[in-house]
């Protein structure tokens, strides 16, 4: 006879708990390290690495269960807040979009953790670093898994806090402390718009849950009435801050003051991608017809998507141009990140969130690789970050060099052998499909710029001869730092061969007709068939950028550009005066407002109301004190007089 | 001339006023205390008079209570005054102003 009760089935059927586990593991490790394990480096390392590795494993599992099949996990949300008409749940979204993003976040996070065990080895605050890293991973996973706008906002802010902790990790360095503050405050400006957008959407629809919103907006596109464009733009403001788009891009280059692995995790793969991910999550919002309320009616048919597309396009051009004249290896990569984020945002604006997510995924791999490679270089050159004081590193650091080169190729979008080629091409195709030729040309131009600054970086830092003592004694770092480089090089090359474009199309537009994926046989050359214009033009600009870089920088011992184009070069070296513009406009305005508010508080609130109230009571008390003579008979007399008065009044 | 309620009440009022004057004007605590007792007895007199003329014993009952309580009060009050005098060496009210701010 068969036993009726078999041991608990494996795999377990409650996948909701798996998703919660992915979210909570990094938090648990961060808390445990902060509260007790600080003293042991071994325990710190083991715990945080295990937490993220298990998270990655579970993410892969969920990806195969829910991501590929395109199923939604029906999760029971926890009721958290219910005030009036506002119901906020803490829920989970496990679908194609989030499971892939989970893999990206936990995967890159794991590799960064691993890399950090080498990079941060000598740091006395090693456990605090890992605790912050775990906390950050938790916050980021929270955004990915969130199923409503309020929950997204909460984790959005947690990401801001943990990024503050990580950028300002070396807080005794004033530049790092300032950069952390700048990142935090700049993000607040965007978040202000974001929360206004959330309130607006909630006010109009009465719900903040993604599913409910999508259903409502799908059923009635006019549900937001004349506020649809405004709501879209306000929500987009959140992404402008987090994904560092113009004009709130200023924090990202400064945030390079943090440890380099942090830059790889936060400023390449995850935090800055959160904005793009959020835009894709609420893409249904941008599909509403454009409309403006009365006073803004002159804006006509300007839709949120127009604003998004142009912001992204201009950011990518702006940052790409600045990157050409930066000398700090991390700043070049930072501006490159800005530029690529601009691509993603532009793709969203062109109605191609699938292309944006595709590029986000490939970019996360190769940009993390670039940052980690830069970290190895900086580590080997004793914290030298100026590329003009490097040189000839290719021979001395072969693993770093080759992986860096692979990532550079992916960033430039070299055909076939790089993932960036496929994802960028999807963006160009989206721009063409949306009938935005100007943005398309702009995007193609940025390919040339990208190739130019990346070739410049590689030629100067890795080729030629060593220009400093530190560079001539550099060597590849230890295995726990080179291993992540090698692992990341694989998806940097091959990720584009997977049908990720179709995957995301299916994830974001589940009901759209199948786009006609090309057969597996020509998957490598798919962009040339699918959108030949973008692919060939991109290739041409890539060759152009490469040749310019070759002519200008091959064997150069100093940058020729300041001599040839002094004004342009100076403007670019000053980052096109973005910080100066802020200092001339926003900051005095803000200081003035702060002084006004401070004055109001000091003179009106504190001076008049608080001091006034206490002063009046005090004065009254001083007056009454005169009546207290201490003479018993005076009291008795007053008492009798009072009684007499009462009797008189009563009898009258 | 018959003695009526009003006569009793006038005497009571005179007694009360004398007592009050004593309380307000005299400086010696002991005299003040005696004046207070005078006021109390003025009230007693009024109560008894009302009781008599209203043919209602409630007023007299109350007077007995007042006399009892007053006896106890005198015991406590005199003890306090004696203790105060021993402590301060004076029984004059204008010297007793240490509660003043």
Image (spheres, rainbow, N blue to C red):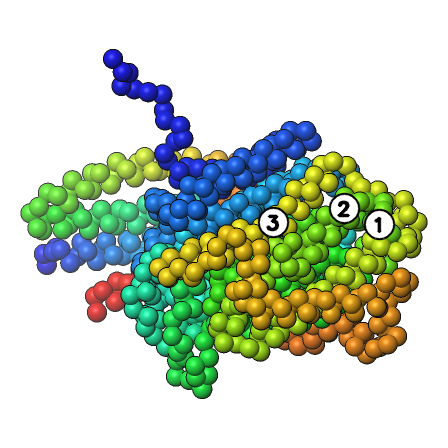
**Residue B2 placement, left or right of A534:** left
Residue at image coords 44%, 37%: A18
- Is residue B77 toward the left or the right of residue B64 in the image? right
Q: Secondary structure at mark 3?
A: helix
The mark found on residue A494 in the picture is: 3
Which residue position is annotated with label 1? A393
Q: Residue furthest front?
A: A521
Q: Earlier in the sequence, mark 2 or mark 3?
A: 2
* Left or right of A221 on screen, residue A189: right
Q: Identify the disc placed on residue A400.
A: 2
Q: Residue at x 40, y 76 (%)?
A: A290
In this view of the protein, which residue sits in the foreground, A410 or A517? A517
The chain carrying label 1 is: A
Q: Nearer the viewer, residue A5 or A206?
A: A5
Which of the two residues, B1 or A436, is positioned nearer the viewer here?
A: A436
- What is the x, y in percent for residue A2? 27, 16
- Mark 1 and mark 2 residues within 8 Å of each other at the beta carbon: yes
Label 3 neighbour load within 10 Å: few <14, some 14-19, many 20+: some
């Amino acid at each position: 006879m068969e036993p009726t009760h078999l041991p608990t089935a494996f795999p377990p059927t409650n996948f909701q708990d798996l998703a919660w586990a992915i979210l909570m593991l990094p938090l648990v490790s961060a808390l445990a390290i902060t509260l007790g394990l600080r003293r042991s480096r071994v325990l710190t390392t083991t715990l945080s690495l295990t937490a993220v590795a298990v998270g990655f494993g579970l993410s892969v599992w969920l990806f195969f269960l829910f991501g590929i099949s395109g199923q939604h996990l029906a999760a029971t949300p926890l009721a958290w807040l219910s005030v009036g008409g506002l119901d906020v749940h803490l829920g989970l979204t496990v679908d194609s979009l989030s499971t892939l993003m989970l893999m990206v976040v936990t995967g890159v996070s794991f590799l960064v953790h691993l890399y950090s065990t080498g990079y941060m080895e000598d740091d006395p605050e090693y456990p605090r670093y890992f605790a912050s890293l775990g906390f950050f991973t938790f916050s980021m996973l929270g955004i990915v898994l969130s199923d409503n706008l309020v929950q997204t906002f909460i984790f959005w802010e947690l990401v801001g806090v943990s990024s503050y902790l990580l950028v300002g990790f070396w807080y005794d360095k004033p530049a790092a402390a300032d950069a952390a503050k700048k990142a935090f405050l700049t993000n607040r400006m965007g978040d202000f718009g974001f929360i206004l957008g959330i309130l607006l959407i909630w006010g109009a629809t009465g719900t903040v849950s993604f599913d409910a919103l999508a259903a409502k907006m799908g059923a009635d596109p006019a549900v937001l009435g004349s506020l649809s464009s405004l709501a879209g733009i306000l929500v987009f403001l959140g992404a402008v801050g987090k994904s560092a788009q113009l004009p709130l891009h200023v924090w990202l280059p400064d945030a390079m003051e943090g440890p380099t692995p942090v830059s790889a995790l936060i400023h390449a793969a995850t935090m800055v991608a959160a904005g793009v991910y959020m835009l894709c999550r609420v893409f249904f919002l941008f599909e509403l017809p454009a409309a403006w309320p009365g006073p803004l009616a002159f804006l006509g048919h300007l839709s949120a998507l127009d604003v998004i597309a142009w912001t992204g396009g201009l950011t990518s051009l702006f940052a790409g141009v600045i990157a050409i004249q930066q000398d700090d290896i991390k700043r070049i990569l930072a501006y490159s990140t800005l530029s690529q984020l601009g691509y993603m945002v532009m793709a969203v604006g062109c109605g191609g969130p699938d292309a944006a997510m595709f590029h986000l995924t490939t970019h996360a791999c190769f940009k993390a690789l670039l940052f980690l490679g830069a970290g190895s270089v900086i580590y080997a050159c004793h914290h030298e970050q100026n590329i003009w004081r490097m040189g000839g590193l290719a021979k001395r650091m072969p693993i770093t060099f080759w992986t860096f080169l692979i990532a550079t190729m992916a960033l430039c979008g070299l055909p076939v052998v790089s993932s960036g080629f496929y994802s960028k091409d999807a963006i160009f195709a989206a721009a063409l499909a949306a009938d935005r030729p100007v943005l398309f040309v702009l995007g193609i131009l940025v390919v040339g710029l990208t190739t130019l600054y990346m070739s410049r970086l590689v030629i100067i830092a890795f080729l030629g001869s060593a220009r400093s003592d530190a560079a001539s004694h550099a060597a590849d770092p230890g295995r726990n730092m080179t291993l992540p480089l090698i692992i990341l090089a694989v998806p940097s090359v091959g990720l584009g061969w997977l049908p990720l474009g179709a995957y995301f199309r299916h994830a974001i537009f589940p009901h759209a007709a199948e786009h006609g994926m090309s057969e597996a046989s020509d998957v490598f050359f798919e962009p040339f068939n699918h959108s030949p214009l973008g692919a060939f033009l991109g290739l041409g600009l890539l060759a152009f950028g490469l040749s310019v870089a070759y002519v200008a920088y091959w064997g150069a011992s100093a940058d020729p550009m300041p001599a040839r184009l002094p004004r342009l070069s100076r403007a670019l070296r000053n980052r096109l005066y973005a910080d100066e513009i802020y200092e001339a406009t926003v900051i005095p305005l803000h200081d003035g407002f702060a002084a006004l508010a401070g004055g109001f508080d000091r003179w009106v609130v504190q001076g008049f109301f608080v001091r006034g109230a206490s002063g009046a009571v005090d004065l009254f008390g001083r007056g009454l004190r005169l009546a207290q003579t201490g003479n018993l008979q005076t009291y008795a007399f007053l008492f009798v007089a009072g009684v007499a008065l009462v009797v008189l009044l009563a009898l009258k | 001339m018959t003695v009526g309620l009003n006569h009793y009440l006038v005497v009571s009022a005179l007694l009360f006023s004398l007592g009050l004057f004593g309380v307000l004007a005299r400086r010696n605590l002991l005299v003040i205390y005696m004046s207070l007792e005078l006021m109390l007895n003025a009230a007693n007199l009024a109560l008894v008079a009302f009781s008599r003329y209203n043919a209602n014993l409630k007023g007299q009952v109350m007077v007995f209570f007042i006399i009892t309580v007053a006896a106890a009060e005198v015991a406590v009050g005199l003890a306090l005054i004696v203790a105060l005098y021993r402590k301060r060496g004076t029984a004059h009210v204008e010297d007793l102003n240490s509660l003043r701010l």
